[in-house]
Amino acid sequence: MSTEANDNVTITAQCLCKAHTFSTEVARSSLPLEGNFCHCHSCRHLTGAMYSSCTLWPGPGDEIQQSSLKAYVFSNRLHALFCGTCSSKMFWQVQPDKPDDPFEYEVFTGTLSNLDIPTLVQFSHQIFVGDTLDGGASPWLRTPNQNGAVARRWLAHSEKSQEIDGDWPSIDSLPEATVKAELEDIPVRCCCKGVDLVLRRSDVEFAETPRSELPWFVDPVTRKGMASFDVCNSCRRQCGSDIFHWTFSLLRQVGFPQKATPGTQQGGSSFPVTSSELRDAVTTSAQSRDPRFGTLTLYASSPDVQRYFCSRCSASVFYCVDDRPDTTDIALGLLEAPSGARAEEVVSWSLGSNAAHRGDMAGGWRDGHMNAVESAAEAWRVARKYPKHWRTVEKEEAMRG
């Protein structure tokens, strides 16, 4: 390989269905790309993730501007560009200050190839942490880089709002893991509110269920649904964040709002209780479709997998797979729990366990990122005295005999 080739790196962003691929060549000496996390309420509800993660696109923007990516007007300054087929969040189109100036583009880091370059992206800031109320995912993103570099935290805009030092909120102020919500039904909404649903809490649904009969995702102590760390290639490409967080429920726990109980409505049909029923309800003709499904649509990423999202703002909503016909994964970033983004009165976090599909990060820059996140998450769990994930505890006890 020539010296010139060794001195350059090809950066590629690609959507989940591969309909959109953008590449640019940069000098290796210009790396790392500077990345940032945004925890604002709107970013969580746009992506379905606990935060958005982006970096300035290092190449020209002409190809992006001329592409067929769909645009959602996120704010006067920012338009979110996404694939209309698979919903992958790909770019922010930053509107210029002057009409004749070109657009700037920021790429969602989850769409970037997992190049074997440890310093490809270095995350420098966490912004709008204040929107989370409870800190959200920020505690385990404080040192998210392989080299140990800190991502400075801000209540709102970087350099323009209060910088956060230490724990925020303080660990002593956080509730016990057994805390319960007052609301039985938790709103589940996308950014544009075209998807507007409710989730019945698992600790309500399974309060009287014998432990041996609990679904696999229910914490046997708190009866809350599990909240997971997922780093599979498909999930990161679709949501645009390198780490995704799901919670889980039976489909019968999901319903339309403004009713007493999910799954029932006076004078109306119930929410589907199987994945095949949900697929048929969403893909039926416009004349037959229940308007309460709003902008919900789906992309079949595999013959047996349906990924549901908002067709208008692109938010990831559900993941269904045929071999779990009565169960769905729900994008945690869409929950509107009173306590904040981590929704601890609703879910039981799988801290102290390995992320799902951890092998997908191996051999690339995300491996070091995830090592740092896992280490920080475990340190925070121990300092907070949050219980280790019950499945991990069961495995450890089984190994000890």
Image (cartoon, rainbow, N blue to C red):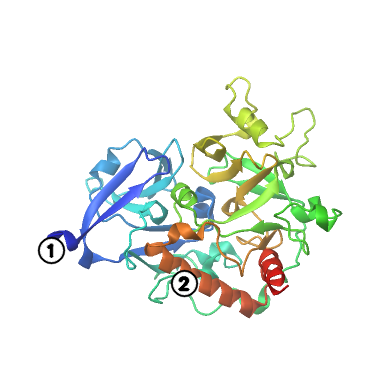
- Is residue 90 visible in the rendered image? The answer is yes
Mark 2 is surrounded, within 10 Å at the Cα level, by few (under 14), some (14 to 19) or many (20 or more) other residues, namely many
Where is the N terminus found, in terms of image quarters?
bottom left
Tell me the residue that label 2 is attached to. 372
In the foreground, 210 or 246: 210
Numbered marks: total: 2
Question: What secondary structure is marked by label 2?
Answer: helix
User: What is the x, y in percent for residue 260?
Assistant: 80, 42
Residue 3, labelled with which disc? 1
| Label 2 – label 1 distance at C-alpha | 32 Å
Quadrant in which residue 30 is drawn: bottom left
- Is residue 79 visible in the rendered image? The answer is no
**Residue type at numbered disc 1:** Thr
- The vertical placement of 226 against 252, above or below, is below
**Residue type at numbered disc 2:** Ala
Seen at 59% across and 44% down, the residue is 318
In the foreground, 356 or 277: 356
User: What is the x, y in percent for residue 100?
Assistant: 22, 45
In the foreground, 137 or 243: 243
